[in-house]
């Protein structure tokens, strides 16, 4: 019973397989180096993009334009048209800003001039809630007195 043992290769892995493994290892190494280089050199993104800055600047210039037109209309006696312009200014401003409070105050004052105290109170209260430094009490008190006198049952 003589069995011939199968020959065990002494050379190890074939040269073709070694070459393929070495080439794939080198390619993987290059890919990782490229990836880490890209990640390391990546610039942090700014919190406000350039387009957002341009939009804010455009909004401010547009707001200034509405305010200028509203002022001219107000000085010309066209109060209702001026109200529309100042409402646009109010809508464009940041919530809680002094500009927003000033626009609401102007709209309220224009409604007082038009003897529409109900609408005036809405805008004066908006200006008051903005916690601005504007003196609103006399206008609000006058309008409240007019509204109460016109609606005595309420």
Image: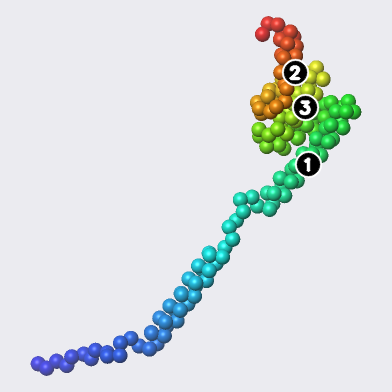
The structure residue drawn at horizontal position 80% and vertical position 33%, both measured from the top left corner, is 85
Disc 1 target residue: 62
Q: Quadrant of residue 92?
A: top right
- Density class for disc 3 (Cα within 10 Å; few <14, some 14-19, many ≥20) is many
Q: Is residue 81 visible?
A: no
Instruction: Give the CA distance from mark 3 to mark 1.
Output: 18 Å
Q: What number is the disc on residue 106? A: 3
> What scheme was used to colour the molecule?
rainbow
Q: Can residue 40 be seen in this view?
A: yes
Give the left or right position of residue 98, taking residue 31 as reference. right
The structure residue drawn at horizontal position 53% and vertical position 64%, both measured from the top left corner, is 39
Q: Of callouts 2 and 1, which one flags the residue occurring earlier in the amino acid sequence?
A: 1
Disc 2 target residue: 139
Regarding mark 3 in the picture, which secondary structure is present there? helix
| Residue found farthest to the left | 1
Viewer-nearest residue: 50 or 131: 131
Please say if 83 is above or below 63: above
Regarding mark 1 in the picture, which secondary structure is present there? helix
Give the left or right position of residue 57, taking residue 47 as reference. right
Instruction: Give the CA distance from mark 3 to mark 2.
Output: 11 Å
Q: Of callouts 3 and 2, which one flags the residue occurring earlier in the amino acid sequence?
A: 3
| Residue found farthest to the right | 76
Frontmost of labels 2 and 1 is 2
In x, y percent, where is residue 6?
21, 90
Instruction: Give the CA distance from mark 2 to mark 1.
Output: 29 Å
In x, y percent, where is residue 154?
66, 8
| Residue found farthest to the top | 153
Viewer-nearest residue: 17 or 56: 56
Quadrant in which the N terminus appears? bottom left
């Amino acid at each position: 019973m003589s069995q011939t043992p199968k020959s065990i290769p002494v050379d190890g892995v074939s040269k073709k397989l070694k070459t393929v493994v070495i080439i794939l290892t080198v390619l993987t190494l290059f890919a990782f180096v490229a990836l880490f280089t890209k990640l390391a050199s990546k610039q942090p993104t700014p919190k406000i993009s350039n387009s957002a800055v341009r939009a804010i600047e455009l909004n401010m210039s547009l707001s200034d334009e509405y305010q200028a037109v509203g002022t001219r209309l107000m000085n010309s006696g066209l109060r209702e048209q001026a109200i529309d312009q100042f409402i646009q200014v109010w809508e464009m401003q940041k919530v809680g800003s002094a500009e927003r409070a000033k626009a609401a105050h102007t709209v309220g004052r224009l409604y007082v001039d038009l003897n529409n105290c109900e609408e005036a109170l809405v805008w004066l209260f908006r200006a008051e809630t903005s916690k601005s430094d504007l003196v609103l009490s006399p206008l609000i008190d006058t309008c409240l007195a007019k509204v109460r006198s016109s609606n005595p049952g309420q």
